[in-house]
Image (cartoon, rainbow, N blue to C red):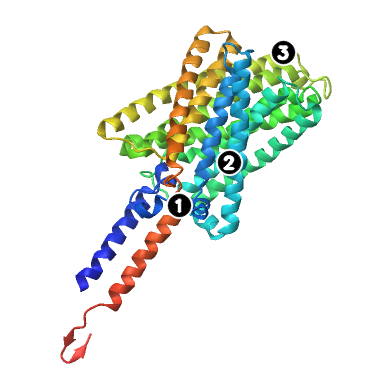
Amino acid sequence: MANSVKRPVIQARKLFQRRTADSHGPHTCTMSRNVGTDTLRRKSLKDIVRHFTPAWFAVTMGTGSIAILFHNFPYATDSSVMRAFTLVFFFFNLALYILFSAVSAARYILFPGIWSRMIRHPVQSLYIGTFPMGATTLINIASADIFETYGFGGKPFIYTVWACWWINVAISFTCCFGMMHIMATLQHHTLKSMTTVWLLPVVTLIVGSSAGGVLAQAVQIYSPSYALLTATVSACMLAIGLSLSLMLFTIYVLRVIVYGYPEGASVMSVFLPLGPCGQAAYSLLKLGSAFTSLLPLDYGDPAGVLRKPGTGETMEVMCVVGALVLWSLASMWILFAILGLGYTLRRGRIAFRLSFWGTVFPNGVYANLNFALATTLSSPFFRVWGSIYAVGTLILWASIFVSTIRMVPSGRIFDAPCLEEVIIGTIAREAEKSEETTKPVQVVGGTCI
């Protein structure tokens, strides 16, 4: 009888340890592999809401990047087909963002205890950064396409979008510094468990700065001073976000050299460094263009540097040089990602997980950077290379979208690892109690022990 009781205890302990160790990989934010597979295949609506993780907002990031690619595609730019695809992806992404926000709000209202569990999870909590970044893609298209291309809404519309950007900036700063503080105080991390998912809270500042660069040119029509304020804040966000990202790159390279590439689906995170590099370079180009049109100032101290002729052009040149450096760095990460992915695929098949959506946005950002460089430098190379990469990104989005749709009816793609690990831990503790209560009685010298 003792052996029969010990067996579930040992199994529960091993399962809990395995899930706890694996929970540092991005794949754990999406699907269950070992626990309750039969029961998780069909989830009720309530269960879907309960297991709706922040990682779902990576879907809006990827879909939004596709809309931006259609808007900036260098061939047939003014065609009705390209404009139609831009609007289709924009409104589809807007619908997804509203839906995901409503489900997330319902999750934390109906199950208030989930927030504290989620925020303590060493991986799932990092995906909170996808919430403001998904909104940024909407802001970009609303400003660059809905307003500038179609002239929709005029001043009230662009000021509303600008106000949304400021709210997004506040959320981005909260995600960045708040999550870094939580990682240091409430969570347990090791070098071996480190993946590029650590970048998600930090990249929010870089992505937000790119939206500021796009908005500055639109706001300038009505208020140059507001546009300059927007560009300046965006530049500060870019400096902070890029600096922190480069620090994390160094840690990740050390992790890969010491422990090798992440195992299983976690290896897909090797594409995430494309996001900070590509988006920071794109932000630099947009900010350089904004400063060129805003500077020199026609007010203020005549001896100030912002009043001197050539200040805007000088800043733009510096931004272009910085963008080229970051493009080179992003291209290097593509090579690393391909090598790491190829190495993992040779060792075994990678099962599809929700975290695969995290690969669409970084690749889309890199393609969009090539479009921006092609426009700035009038370069056929960047135009052709960016177009090829954009088509590949669209194919990637379509394949992941189809795979996701196939898994939605069964409910298997809806899984919150922080809840699952609580269940496993409860099973282990209950099994241990059962073991103690059924412990065999031994008699030694007439005394029961």
Q: Amino acid at mark 3?
A: Gly
In the displayed structure, 6 sits above or below 14; it is below
> Is residue 124 in sight in this rendering?
yes
Give the residue displayed 49% in from the left and 24% down from the top.
394
Q: Secondary structure at mark 3?
A: loop
Q: Nearer the viewer, residue 436 or 255?
A: 436
Q: CA distance from mark 3 to mark 1?
A: 62 Å
In the picture of the structure, the residue carrying the numbered disc 1 is 43
Q: Secondary structure at mark 2?
A: helix
Give the residue displayed 26% in from the left and 77% down from the top.
438
Q: Secondary structure at mark 1?
A: loop
In the displayed structure, 408 sits above or below 441; it is above
Give the residue displayed 28% in from the left and 65% down from the top.
9
Q: Earlier in the sequence, mark 3 or mark 1?
A: 1
Q: Earlier in the sequence, mark 3 or mark 2?
A: 2
Give the label, 3 or 2, closer to the camera: 2
Place residue 349 in its image quadrant: top left
In the displayed structure, 32 sits above or below 142; it is below
x and y percentages locating residue 64 in the rendered image:
57, 30
x and y percentages locating residue 423 in the rendered image:
41, 60
> Is residue 284 in sight in this rendering?
no
Is residue 4 rendered to the left or right of residue 266? left
In the picture of the structure, the residue carrying the numbered disc 3 is 310
Q: Residue furthest left?
A: 445
x and y percentages locating residue 386 in the rendered image:
50, 16
Q: Residue furthest right?
A: 299
Q: CA distance from mark 3 to mark 2?
A: 39 Å
Is residue 330 rendered to the left or right of residue 80? left
In the picture of the structure, the residue carrying the numbered disc 2 is 131
Total numbered labels placed on residues in the image = 3
Q: Nearer the viewer, residue 319 or 105?
A: 105
